[in-house]
Amino acid sequence: MGPVEYFSSRIIYPAMNNPYTFQTNQFGLTADAVDLLRNRFPYKSIPIHSISSIDIRKGKDMKNWWWVLSIGLALTLYAIWDIGQIFGILTDKNTRTVYIERLIIPAIPLMLGIYSIIISLRNAKVMIIKAGDNSHYLSLRDLEKQQQADAFITHLQSKYNGVNIIY
């Protein structure tokens, strides 16, 4: 009896071969293309011959970081304002009862706001691929974590001569 028949409630798939030389959550690099990924599956392929330039620089880890920063600032400012209101309630002599829920309400927006601010201000190496009229902003943070960013850059420079490194 094989493992698939014995574990009938669980399907066991064979290991998939990884076609990418370098892979992150956002893209995978093959011999002749850069595949844009979602959930480790390619949804768009950019052939190397259609790329006009590749810029590698230090930049924000997110593409629309200013949206996340503004939401984080708004949540944090609301939480600070609400904490001020709570102190006003606590120092008022006419207040007899303050429920615990009222004291905990600003904690969630404060934590989400601080997290959003930290995430939006995070810097990493980014790669900007320009192909035709399109521009793709891709983070190299995963490669930096795996300590493969330098190997990736040298591999990319050997495959494609239009790589601009701007630090």
Image (cartoon, helix red, strand yellow):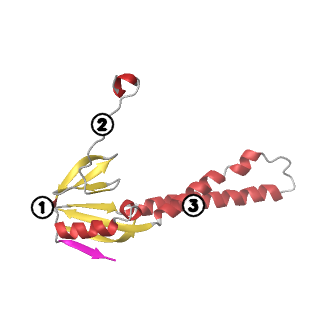
Q: Residues within 10 Å of mark 2 (few under 14, many from 20)?
A: few
- Residue 14 badge: 2
Quadrant position of the N terminus in the picture = top left
Q: Earlier in the sequence, mark 3 or mark 1?
A: 1
Mark 3, residue position? 114
Please tell me which residue is depicted at 36% across the width and 68% down the height of the picture: 125
Number of numbered discs visible in the structure rendering: 3
User: How far apart in space, not on screen, are marks 3 and 1 (Cα)?
Assistant: 43 Å
Which of these two is toward me, 126 or 116?
A: 126
Mark 1, residue position? 49
**Mark nearer the viewer, 2 or 1:** 2
Question: Looking at the picture, how far across and down is residue 6, in whole percent?
Answer: 39, 23
Question: Looking at the picture, how far across and down is residue 164, in whole percent?
Answer: 24, 74
Q: Residues within 10 Å of mark 1 (few under 14, many from 20)?
A: few
Q: Are marks 2 and 1 in contact (CB under 8 Å)?
A: no
The three-letter code of the residue at mark 1 reads: His
Q: Is residue 86 above or below residue 152?
A: above
The three-letter code of the residue at mark 2 reads: Pro
Question: Looking at the picture, how far across and down is residue 114, in whole percent?
Answer: 57, 60
Quadrant position of residue 7: top left
Q: Earlier in the sequence, mark 2 or mark 1?
A: 2
Question: Looking at the picture, how far across and down is residue 46, in whole percent?
Answer: 19, 56
Q: Is residue 54 left or right of residue 59?
A: left
Magenta range: 162-167
User: How far apart in space, not on screen, are marks 3 and 2 (Cα)?
Assistant: 43 Å
Which of these two is toward me, 1 or 147?
A: 1
Q: Is residue 74 visible?
A: no
- Dot 2 falls on a residue whose secondary structure is loop
- Dot 3 falls on a residue whose secondary structure is helix
